[in-house]
Image (cartoon, rainbow, N blue to C red):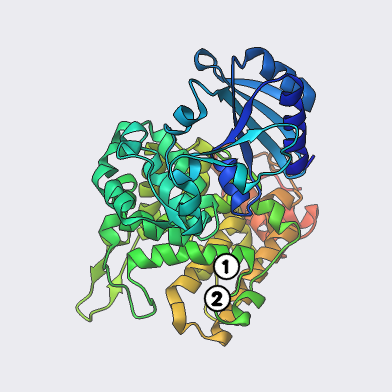
Amino acid sequence: MDFSNIIRVLSSFFASRNIQAFLVGGVVRDVLLGNLPKDVDLVIEGTTDPVTRDLARTFCGRLVNLDKSRGISRVVLQCDTGSFNIDISSVGDSIADNVKHRDFTINAMALPLDEESYSINRDMVIDCYGGLIDLDTKMLRALSPSVFKDDPVRLIRAPRLAISNELTICEETASQIRSDVSLLDRIAPERVRDEFLKLMSETNARKSLGILDDLNILSQIIPELDQSRAVIQPKEHYWDVFNHLLETVRMVEIVLDGHTIRDDFVVDCIPRFNDMENYFGEEITDGHNRKTALKIAALLHDIAKPTTRTVEVSGKIRFLGHPSEGAVMSAAVLNRMRFSKKGVELIRLMVQHHLRPSQMAPNGEMPSGKAIYRYFRDVGVAAIDTLYLNLADYLAARGPKLEEEEWKEYCSMISWILNEGIKSKAPDNLPKLITGHDIMDVYGLGPGPELGSLLKLVYEAHANGEIDTRVEALKLVKSNLRTGGSGA
């Protein structure tokens, strides 16, 4: 079922029951802008309880009570684009009174829903606060001076709505945001996390981050980033640390989505693999996918550079240990924002190992099978993601100075690691030639650290193509026994 059919069913459903219903908020805004709504916000006259049960049955959907005391429910159904939510609440005294409690003028519009109105007609829109004018002039305006005090999470929502709908935040509202930004400390970290994730999940996240920064919101939610401002990097880097972090977020979108930045060769060289879109589309943390997690890792990957920065007598700048220290700092940031354990670990691993793909072989050489095996073993669930973070990091480091040949060579190296890892070298895909029990049975070795070391030695040799059979594995074990066994 597509969106137009959903509206048609809703219109018929309420008309047949003589219930006045109104589409409100984002669904009206989105359709007027020509965007496909991701959900429907609906208010009706009268009580909602029996109506929502009937509506759920009509759509063969699932009913969720969001706030039973206030009569707010959700019907979850499946449509052409996946899961779709219809949120239903009571209109209250009047539709004008209902919309006055919303956040921005473009979200304070309503449309009466009846059997004749299967599409949203501009002339039928109830607009008490100038939302249509603001849509026409591409302006995002707070509905009242108390908007952000009523719900501080709207401070983060404003930049997201502005970017996703190509709007400009009016100066009065921008000033209001800057004055109220400290209110974010008063709300649950989970709500900040959820709105921040929504912002990072959408296209042009780098631009959204720029607006967050201009409005002093970024400093409020991740103050650790402030230390990176104006921190000069070695000559290989085009940007200072702070701007490099923001640019790396932009480059993640280019690397994954294939949008060219200025030269086709940048996108043409990026390695791809089967089912790549579904891989990065996998839900991984707090309702969001690997792609969003990768953009957050990009924002945090050099967060420890300011604290690890040293300048040698020669003038050489170093950031020794910044990946490991950055992993600790990133985990602290994400735990403070109440990210899931799975999300924290994935992003922590990416930050800790973001330089590793470029350090697996001498310049001009391809990494060995053993090095690739160790990489996939150590980085685990984040191994593939980290390769793409590394590519985005490289692009952001070079900036406009990127040369075609160096980029082609670099992508070839990352492609080699990726393909070899996916094909056969990753530990999950590598067949076991022998087990710990085999070693104990054949050589009389007991459990202990030496047994683990010998198994690791066998797996690495197998990954590197040095051995390929059980006999060869046992010979390798025999030649490396410290205690001396009975022999085969």
> Which amino acid is tagged 2?
Ile
The residue nearer to you, when weighing 332 against 169, is 169
Question: Residue placed at 50% from the left, 13% from the top?
Answer: 69
Question: Residue placed at 32% from the left, 73% from the top?
Answer: 233
Residue density around tag 1, few if under 14, some if 14–19, many if 20 or more, within 10 Å: some
Disc 2: which residue: 261
113 versus 290 height, above or below? above
Q: Position of residue 224 (x, y in %)?
A: 30, 51
Question: Residue placed at 77% from the left, 20% from the top?
Answer: 57
The residue nearer to you, when weighing 415 against 175, is 175
Work out how far the residue at label 2 is from the one at label 1, CA to CA, in angstroms.
7 Å
Dot 2 and dot 1 residues touching (CB under 8 Å)? yes
Numbered label attached to residue 254: 1
Give the mark count. 2
The residue nearer to you, when weighing 136 against 221, is 136
Secondary structure state at the residue bearing disc 1: helix
Secondary structure state at the residue bearing disc 2: loop
Judge left or right: residue 189 versus residue 444: left
Using the rendered view, name the quadrant where residue 75 is placed.
top right
Q: Position of residue 481 (x, y in %)?
A: 61, 51
The answer to whether residue 304 is visible is yes
The residue nearer to you, when weighing 189 against 59, is 59
Judge left or right: residue 192 versus residue 480: left
Using the rendered view, name the quadrant where residue 189 is placed.
top left
The answer to whether residue 484 is visible is no
144 versus 35 height, above or below? above
